[in-house]
Amino acid sequence: MVNAMDESASLPAFPRPKVLVVDDQALNIRLLHELLRADCDVYMATSGSQALELARSLMLDLILLDVVMPDVDGHEVCRRLKADPLTQAIPVIFITAQQEMADEVKGFELGAVDFITKPINPVTVKARVRTHIALKQQADMLKRIALVDGLTGIANRRRFDEAFTIFWRQSQRDQTPLSLILFDVDFFKRYNDRYGHQAGDQCLIAIANAAKSALHRPNDVIARYGGEEFACILPNTDSNGGASVASKILENICAQAIEHRDAPPRCIVTVSLGVATLRIFPEATPESLIKVADEQLYKAKVAGRSRFEAIAL
Ligand code: GH3
Ligand code: MG
Ligand code: MG
């Protein structure tokens, strides 16, 4: 698919779209594959259950779904796709030989975005596929922009708040520890004053990257919490783990040795960190864990900066 974004240097181009074609007749699949393969990566499923499996693993942009199939029919596949948070945002277009009004109504009620009737008209199919892929990719990009920090590319505060609530609940439910790290750049006002605001921004990018490489588990989240403050959520991580990540973040940032002549004695950019770990503590709230981590961060500042302080609740 040609998209206008390709011409813009400042915006990332959309990746090649992924479309799943689901039909129990191999001939129909082949037809659609021929039609779409120039513009999309086309995946194929010949049964409802196979379609559901692929949809969960492929990060699809669109599903073309036959209604009448022997095992799980198209309506049921659609119902299950829309009930699963992992697949509910994938647009579904029904492809059907039945031109019954009632079927269309049912399809839309189940969350389909469009209908194509067999025998298919190549021009119609291409146009509709193109439209729905464009809508899906724009929605994805908006979602991404809404949750990513524009300067550093890590999660923003909104994403942090969302993720923290989710991991907090999970830790309470599963009775697993949860660690939170807050950290703040040392003497950053002086850095801006001496090197300028643009250099300050570059410094924040370098700090975000250095800190990010200290996190290794797929569920760990690093976010820009405020101007020069960052936060890490470490699910299923006890106080030893929290301390070891904090120490690694500090080490990675120091290893960059970014000159900061007004931060004696080492004259490099450093951070101070506060770690709070939640074990089992019925009275704790998400806010209280943040407050405690912030208190630890303050302690680290008072104790001389470029260090971390940790506590377990
Ligand atoms: P401390 O070691 O106690 O943290 O001292 P500090 O100077 O880092 O703390 P303070 O809170 O006094 O100053 C924070 C500075 O961070 C002030 C502000 O100009 C700078 N800052 C905040 N956000 C940004 C940003 O997005 N870009 C740049 N360049 N600077 C920022
Ligand atoms: Mg600060
Ligand atoms: Mg600071």
Image: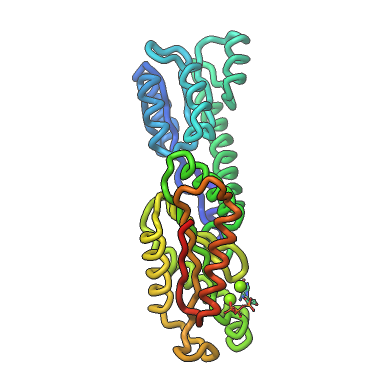
Observer able to see residue 9: no
**On the image, which quarter does residue 290 sit in?**
bottom right
Residue at position x 34%, y 19% in the image: 26
Q: Is residue 287 above or below residue 297?
A: above
Determine whether, in the image, residue 17 is placed left or right of residue 188: left
Residue at position x 52%, y 91% in the image: 261
Ligand 2 image-quadrant field: bottom right
The answer to which of 1 and 141 lies nearer the viewer is 141
Q: Is residue 73 above or below residue 238?
A: above
In percent of width and height, residue 263 lies at 52, 87
Residue at position x 42%, y 27% in the image: 21
The answer to which of 103 and 223 lies nearer the viewer is 223
User: In the rendered picture of this protein, how many numbered marks are placed on residues?
Assistant: 0
In percent of width and height, residue 174 lies at 43, 40
Residue at position x 39%, y 64% in the image: 245
Observer able to see residue 126: yes
